Image (cartoon, grey):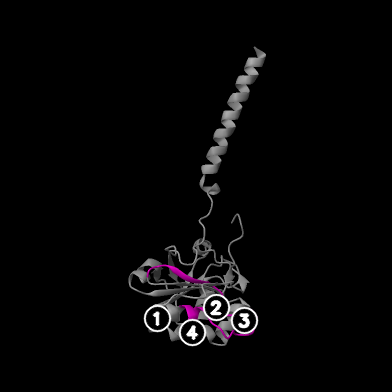
Amino acid sequence: MKTMSLIRFGAAGLAAATLAFASMAMSPSHVAEAEPPKVDEKAPDFTLTDTDGKEHKLSEYTKDGKIVVLEWFNPGCPFVKKHYTGGNMNKVAAEFKDKDVVWLLINSGAPGKQGAGKETNVKRKKDWKIERPILLDESGEVGKLYGAKKTPEMYVIDTEGVLRYHGAIDNNRRANRIGDVNYVRSALDKIIAGETVTTKEEPAYGCSVKYASPGR
């Protein structure tokens, strides 16, 4: 009888453990994060608010026939500074201002992290004469959705909402020199001309995106 009871207990315990494991695997905290978008695939939609309180929705821009550039931004990062203090990023963006291109800066820094916070970004927007919106993503949700790891890190999305370029802004990975090849400019020129983007990906360089620490 004792043997039978132990067998029944063992079977019941195994069933309970299996059920508990299944429940844990299905719980939201154990669901795998979505894969970041790949080049030549649909870019995920999102909505974020900028430092002026205006909402921006990616799909609204592409629906209106706009090409969209996403630039991951951190005003405290030396690699970001090199492109703004010398005027490079503003210059490239200005070239496409009247060509149905929307250029959005996204700061995924968590509160208290380097370059994060509305006040800091409002100040830098003025100091660096940035005419483009700076969107705040303090939760890091959009940054992680796109797999953004560096600042600056660039994404060029065509009018169909398809990601056509992802990676570095240019070909000089130093913190004090601008490259002689600008990948974003090249991608935009190709898309506007109705041609295939030839350089689709280049590893992004710069500072790490200042996401919130795990568990916070």
Judge depth for marks 3 and 4 and give the one in front: 3
Q: Name the residue under label 3.
A: 172
Contact between marks 2 and 4 (CB within 8 A): the answer is no
The type of residue carrying mark 2 is Ile
**Considering the numbered disc 4 on the image, is that residue within a helix, a strand or a loop?**
helix
Judge depth for marks 1 and 2 and give the one in front: 1
Expressed as whole percent of the image width and height from the top left, the position of residue 171 reads 59, 80
Label of residue 169 in the image: 2
Expressed as whole percent of the image width and height from the top left, the position of residue 186 reads 49, 81
Q: Earlier in the sequence, mark 3 or mark 4?
A: 4
In front here: 201 or 148? 201
Label of residue 143 in the image: none
**Considering the numbered disc 3 on the image, is that residue within a helix, a strand or a loop?**
loop
Residue at mark 1 to residue at mark 4: CA–CA distance: 17 Å
In front here: 35 or 114? 35
Q: Mark 4 points at which residue?
A: 92
Residue furthest top as drawn: 1
Mark 3 crowdedness (10 Å alpha carbons): few <14, some 14-19, many ≥20? some
Q: Earlier in the sequence, mark 1 or mark 2?
A: 2
Q: Give the range drawn in magenta.
A: 160-187
Assess whether residue 87 is covered by the magenta stretch. no
In the picture provided, is 178 more to the left or to the right than 38?
Answer: right
Judge depth for marks 3 and 1 and give the one in front: 1
Q: Which of marks 3 and 1 is nearer the N terminus?
A: 3
Residue at mark 3 to residue at mark 1: CA–CA distance: 26 Å
The type of residue carrying mark 3 is Asn
The type of residue carrying mark 1 is Ala
Residue at mark 2 to residue at mark 3: CA–CA distance: 9 Å
Assess whether residue 176 is covered by the magenta stretch. yes
Mark 2 crowdedness (10 Å alpha carbons): few <14, some 14-19, many ≥20? many
Q: Earlier in the sequence, mark 2 or mark 4?
A: 4
Q: Mark 1 points at which residue?
A: 193
